[in-house]
Image: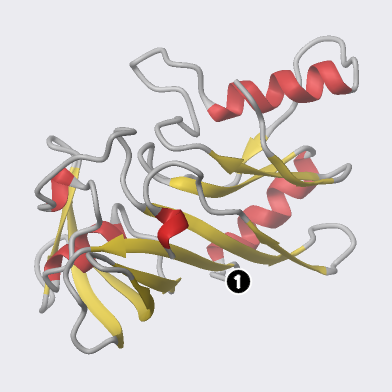
Amino acid sequence: MFVDVLYEDNHVIIVNKATNVLVQSDTTGDTSLEDAVKLYIKEKYNKPGEVFLGVIHRIDRPVSGVVLFAKTSKALTRLNEQLKKKEFKKTYRAIVKQKPIPESSILKHYIVRNPKINKSIAYDKPTADAKEASLAYRTIAQSQNYYLLDIDLHTGRHHQIRCQLAKIGCPIKGDLKYGFARSNQNGGISLHAYSLTFVHPVSKEEISVIAPLPHDDIWHVF
């Protein structure tokens, strides 16, 4: 598997995940991004034995974009602490068919995850086992048939962007699970983790990385 490295130093490595690649291995047995990055590090630096790699956060299999890994235990601990304190800034790009009304807004819902069907449901009011979810979206472009949204994620709930956009009648292109009519040719959905900003765990400098949009699907239209 090709590893598209966006940034790398002694403590962290950031890659642009392709659509339909797992971040971490699951019951399918498919090669994960974690496996591929470990192999990349092992071969690039001729490392003997097991390569240390810490998964800081994940994005869904059908989603593409920025994924951050820690290359040292020190970096892993400090980045996990940043994540816990919600100090990461994450933005996404999404393609939808229905025009959001209004064109920009903050969405706040209460999300309940159903692990049996691997799906989340967004409610307008608090309910049992629900977690509060918040994001800001704005419409930044449109084509003949679709709209491109920029999304600032405030919380990191299961399938949050997917179910919140579906809740307002704007399911993401290709996302059959959340109500879009047709699948994408590549089997993924038109949701891309576009940028990530965080404080470097060792140098304390602010790191901001942008993942180029995928070449497949209709991203090029925008």
| Residue at 9%, 69% in the rendered image | 127
Residue 59: image location, x then y, percent: 44, 46
| Residue at 70%, 32% in the rendered image | 53
Determine whether the residue tagged by mark 1 lies in a helix, strand or loop.
Answer: loop
In the picture of the structure, the residue carrying the numbered disc 1 is: 87
Q: Quadrant of residue 153?
A: bottom left
Q: In the rendered view of the protein, which quadrant contains the N terminus?
A: top right
Residue 11: image location, x then y, percent: 83, 45
| Residue at 24%, 57% in the rendered image | 172
Q: Nearer the viewer, residue 92 or 55?
A: 92
Res 24 seen here: yes
Q: Quadrant of residue 81?
A: bottom right
Residue 83: image location, x then y, percent: 57, 61
Q: Residue furthest front?
A: 144
**133, above or below 7, in the image:** below
Q: Nearer the viewer, residue 146 or 208?
A: 146
Q: Amino acid at mark 1?
A: Glu
**69, above or below 85, in the image:** above
Left or right for 167, reference 37: left
Left or right for 211, reference 121: right
Res 57 seen here: no
Q: How is the image coloured?
A: secondary structure
Residue 29: image location, x then y, percent: 40, 12
| Residue at 23%, 46% in the rendered image | 174
Q: Quadrant of residue 205?
A: bottom right
Mark 1 crowdedness (10 Å alpha carbons): few <14, some 14-19, many ≥20? some
Q: In the rendered view of the protein, which quadrant contains the C terminus?
A: bottom left
Left or right for 29, reference 179: right
